[in-house]
Image: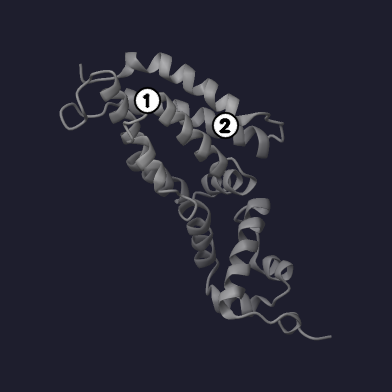
Amino acid sequence: MKPPEARRRLSPDLREQEIVREAVKFFAEFGFEGQTRELAKRLGITQPLLYRYFPTKDALVERVYQEVFLRRWNPFWEELLQDRSKPLGERLTAFYRDYSQVILTYEWVRLFMFSGLKGLDFNTRYLDLLRQRVFDLIINELRLAHSRKPPDEAPITTMEIEAVWGLHAAIFYLGVRKFIYNMPVENINSIVDLELRIFLDGVPGTLAGR
């Protein structure tokens, strides 16, 4: 019988894309303890061929991070949150509905959880990105909507960050229920809308910059 890699020849670019796609699925299923030997078997290639594209497992894991957490980031979200031609509640609803479609997937949720359990820095890097590109924007827009001083005049407080964390965590938890606890979650958009109503009703009391 022909060796696995001889059965289906692909160009280097296509082979690399195939490896990354399968690695995303593989690590989401088994966690980052999953062995590259088993991944190669699933791909129908030899382990040495896999290492021609990714010399170390760490290099492959880093590519998975780039693929799942960075390439799926939509720069339009930042524009949306700052589009003051629309009411803030409408902007937040549009953002979190779209964002939830990206993160509330089997692969995204499980890889994020496995990363934390493994002690990788995926979570820290991604959450730093989230804080800089989303949380600070939301707080700035909230202050403006409630006639408070902007962050350059009154620094963002811990409680303001915690308020946005609470909203974000409530939405992410829908994915935990579905893909970690295997509990059905129906009508995610309606739940997102509910969490936003609770947030917008309660958040004025936490805002600084009076």
Q: State the image coordinates of residue 126 (x, y, percent, origin top left).
A: 43, 47
Neighbour tally class for label 2: few under 14, some 14-19, many 20 plus, Cα within 10 Å: some
Picture layout, residue 126 above or below residue 162:
below
Classify residue 32 by image quadrant: bottom right
* Residue in the picture at 54% in, 65% down: 60
N-term mark: 2 or 1: 1
Query: Could you tell me which quadrant the N terminus lies in?
Result: bottom right
Q: Marks 2/1: CA distance? A: 26 Å
Q: Amino acid at mark 2?
A: Tyr
Q: State the image coordinates of residue 57 (x, y, percent, origin top left).
A: 55, 66
Element on which disc 1 rests: loop
The furthest residue to the right:
1
Residue 87's disc number? 1
Task: Give the label, 2 or 1, closer to the camera.
Answer: 1
Taking 138 as reference, is 117 left or right? right
* Residue in the picture at 54% in, 72% down: 54
Asked whether 149 or 93 is in front, the reply is: 93
**Number of numbered discs on residues:** 2
> Pointer 2 and pointer 1: residues touching (CB < 8 Å)?
no
Asked whether 191 or 205 is in front, the reply is: 191
Q: How is the image coloured?
A: one colour
Taking 33 as reference, is 64 left or right? left
Check disc 2 and report the residue beneath it: 173
Q: Amino acid at mark 1?
A: Pro
Taking 175 as reference, is 86 left or right? left
Element on which disc 2 rests: helix
Picture layout, residue 118 above or below residue 148:
below
Classify residue 14 by image quadrant: bottom right
- Is there any visible trace of residue 180 in the rendered image? no
Q: State the image coordinates of residue 6 (x, y, percent, origin top left).
A: 73, 85
* Residue in the picture at 33% in, 23% down: 159
